[in-house]
Amino acid sequence: MGLSGRSKLQKILHRKIRRSFIRTKHCFILSCKNSTIKSHSISKARILEKISKHGEVMFMSTEDVENHEGFSLFPTGKAKATTFPGFCDKHDKIFEPIDAHQYEAGNLEQEFLFAMRAAAREYTVRIAMQDNLEEIVREHESAENEGEGIGLSNEGLEDIKLYKIGFTAGTKELERLRINIGLNFRKKKYRMIRTETLVIKGEFPLVASSCFKLEIGSSGKTINSISRFSDKGKPTFFTLFPQSGKTYCLISWQRMNNKSYKDLVGLNLKTQKEKKVIVSNLLTSYVENFAANPDYWESLPKKVQKTFREYWAESSFLEVVPFIFDPEFSLFI
């Protein structure tokens, strides 16, 4: 498929995804029926403002369809970057302890809220993508809306149906996570979340908020077997931001999964170089809700940027994603 063909397909897919977000959006808080707003998954005033340049940050995107490299980071207004329709105006304010106050390592409420926000974004994106997949299958099978379809072959349709089986299982897991987080939040049981805080010296203008299934731990033991739909997911919550001369990376999980995550305990005791490599590798392998200061990102060596782009794209197709794919790779330079 030529560049113009890919561009057309990409535009159709993004249009469909936007419609899915509109159809499926609702507040992450249980039983809330209020209309949602564009919530920031990373604090706009406390964090994005800090790393922005002329009101913009470099934000990960696949929407620049004319770019021959496909996905990359592109200049995006800080008011738009990292937003998602996951909370109503009332419940967006529950994040005041992390939006208006600096993080204190070991503060259980703050660490719970960081994890909750990451989970909410993943849940919101996931149900929209599920809706999108179902629409694609419906349109193909009914042969309706000609001109809006994406030209799937029958083989391609079967691939999507197979992919949808695993995707549906993951969506159900996130619904259970939503309920669990909601009940614990209501009762202020913040100890539900266990956090390992990696502290890197220096304020690096890189920020992220994500919820994913870490596949392999630091010792090489399996935490989540993505290929086995029957396995119960053990989500990882990942938050990254600069503050007060340091850069904090919060890697969190549910305490009921402590046994699976035991070899991640003590990561902050690693050397500065090791922590930079760990955070950089995890960020590249798993995270797409990621932003950076424009000047800093452009100053990174071209080789580092190339490795980032290539491995981020490749990691989606690996049978198993390693904890460290490159022991020398670092975005903290």
Image (cartoon, grey):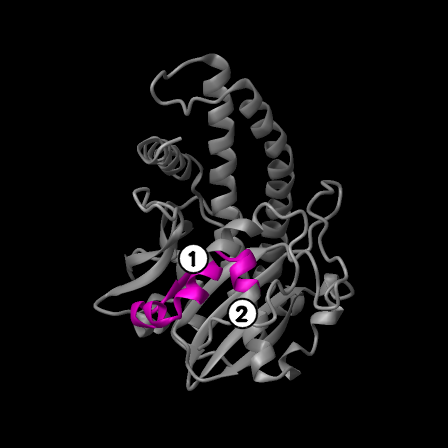
Amino acid beneath label 1: His
Which residue lies under the disc numbered 1? 91
Q: Earlier in the sequence, mark 1 or mark 2?
A: 1
Which residue position holds label 2? 329
What residue type is disc 2 on? Phe
Q: What whole-number distance in Å separates the C-alpha atoms at marks 1 and 2?
A: 39 Å
At 61% from the left edge and 84% from the top edge, which residue is drawn?
A: 271
Q: Is residue 24 left or right of residue 180?
A: left
317, above or below 44, in the image: above
Q: Which residues are magenta?
A: 282-308
| Residue 81 counted in the magenta span | no
Q: Is residue 159 left or right of residue 9?
A: right
On the image, the x and y values in percent for residue 231 come to: 75, 46
Quadrant position of residue 219: bottom right
Q: Residue at x 30, y 43 (%)?
A: 66
Badge 2, how many Cα within 10 Å: few under 14, some, many 20+? many
In the picture, the quarter occupied by the N terminus is top left
